[in-house]
Amino acid sequence: MRKFCLSLLIMWAPAFAQMPSTLSQLKELQGTLPVAETPPAVQGPILERPIDPAEYVLGPGDRLQILIVGRTDQNISALIGPEGDIVIPSVGRILLANLTLQAGRERVIERLREVYRIDRIDLSLSELRKFRVSVSGAVANPQLVVVDAVSRLTDALLAAGGLLNNPETGTVSATTPPDRRQLNVSQQPQEIIAAQSANKPGRLFASRRKIAINRHNGQVLYADLDKFDRTGDLQSNPILLDGDRIVVPYQNLQAGKVAVDGAVRAPGVFEYLSGDTVGDLLALGHGLAADADTSHLILARFVGRTSQVEQMVLPLGDPNSATYAKTLAMPLTSDDRIWVRPQANYHLRYHVTVEGEIARPGIYAIDVDRRWLSQILENAGGPTANACLNCAYLRRPSLGQGNDPELTRLERMQPQGFTEIDREYYKFHMRQGQGLIPLDLHALLQGGDKRLDLLLQDGDVIVLPVAEKSIAVFGQVINPGYYRYNRDFSVQDYINLAGGYNYRANKKQMRVIRDIGGEWLKPDNRMLMQDGDRIFVPEKGPKREWWDITKEVIAVASQVATVLLIVFTATDDSSSN
């Protein structure tokens, strides 16, 4: 036994010596081995939903799987041939073309039971047929295209390159305002479409609502792609059958339109179809908007073949009422237009913003009955301890937006041409804050002065600055700078803190500049200073000598005397003559 084991060891030792001894060698060896390719996944038909046996129509190319359970089980794969039948041994030909899957199943089972004694028969559709249909007319590439038994009209049109330059519907006109509040009943719908394509002369546009599908049996279906796109109606985009011939006509850009505008979800201009009703057009517009006035709508209709427009008011009311149903069932004529009025003041989203030193800054809704300044400040939790109540202001965007022709005139002039009143008017507009309204919250909130309560408007911004606790004194004072704010101090008190006036100070022209609004005020003993105000003391002008003034007076007097002398001389000469 020992000799036998030694013999085996000696025999296999060379083979073991040639095997890779490290993990890296094993990985290298593994990388050189061929890798088996994963077989591609079987691609089945792309279905909208499971096939309904009561709707699916059989035709040449469909493959059926027939399972027979009895004394001898059989599994038969039968392909419907070009003549529309299948052949089963011992049974013969069974014609199935143009039958639904359910009807075909019943026919096959009936024929099999005539021949076989069977317990159960199952028939299923295992493979969909493919066939060709023709696409012609206003498409990019008129041709025969291949589709399958669940393809719809849009699949064939896509295979033919799509519709020919079809303009988008969904915009009544390029100038329709966003609030959809105006409808020009004198403008014809064809003018709207023509305006959209004015920069594309000579182009033809495909119809979207009059596409004909000619069936092999002589039946003609008309597809409405606008209805399919906007309402999801699958009947407007039918499933294709063997032998279908699709014809896409061209649009008539001069007439044959209907339009819906106003308070609907998707206003638009559409081709007119015979049989269109008010309800159909509203459905193309995705129905009434939330702000629609549901009491009535307006129908604009041309009188005969003239351009005269007749406007009709159609009642709506309760959607469950007979009046509502009658209005929606009213037939339309070519070039009719429907206007749905919006409800006035529907859900007005008024709000104001509170910023700065407030307990709860943010956006607050306001309504007609509750939009006073004090109420909003109360809702926001009131000012913080660091708020400057006398420095608060309101920014109103609507102020300062109007066109001031006088200010425009002054901005175009050279300053040298300003009169005194022009200069004052210009300074006033430059100094006032754009859209700023000063607020005295100290008197309103702590003093209870309701006269200072302000009625707010949509978009107002209330700003409560942090208290700076300082007054600026600059200009012709001894020590210009910032001084601690004391609400009991007067203007003269702050001048004294700054060391008083220097010798060049022009006391009569001294001004207080308000921090809020930038207003320049002439101070008096009763003026109350506000936190952040600035006191400006200008410099005196150059001092004029009395002799210079006397010379100017004498020069003017001599000119006046000369003029008077000339007048008197001329008067005497005329009297003597």
Image (cartoon, helix red, strand yellow):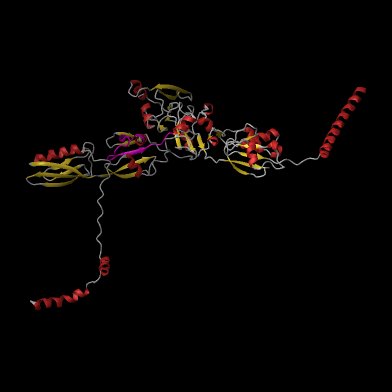
Image position, residue 420 (x, y; %): 70, 34
Identify the image quadrant of residue 482: top right
The kind of secondary structure the magenta stretch mainly shows is loop
543 horizontally vs 344: left or right: right
Residue found at x 68% / y 34%: 422
99 horizontally vs 183: left or right: left
Q: Is residue 513 above or below residue 11?
A: above
> Is residue 424 shown to the viewer in this render?
yes
Identify the image quadrant of residue 521: top right
Judging depth in this view, the residue of 257 and 427 nearest the camera is 427
Q: Is residue 449 above or below residue 12?
A: above
Range shown magenta: 230-253
11 horizontally vs 430: left or right: left
Judging depth in this view, the residue of 278 and 96 nearest the camera is 278
Image position, residue 164 (x, y; %): 41, 41
Residue found at x 33% / y 42%: 156
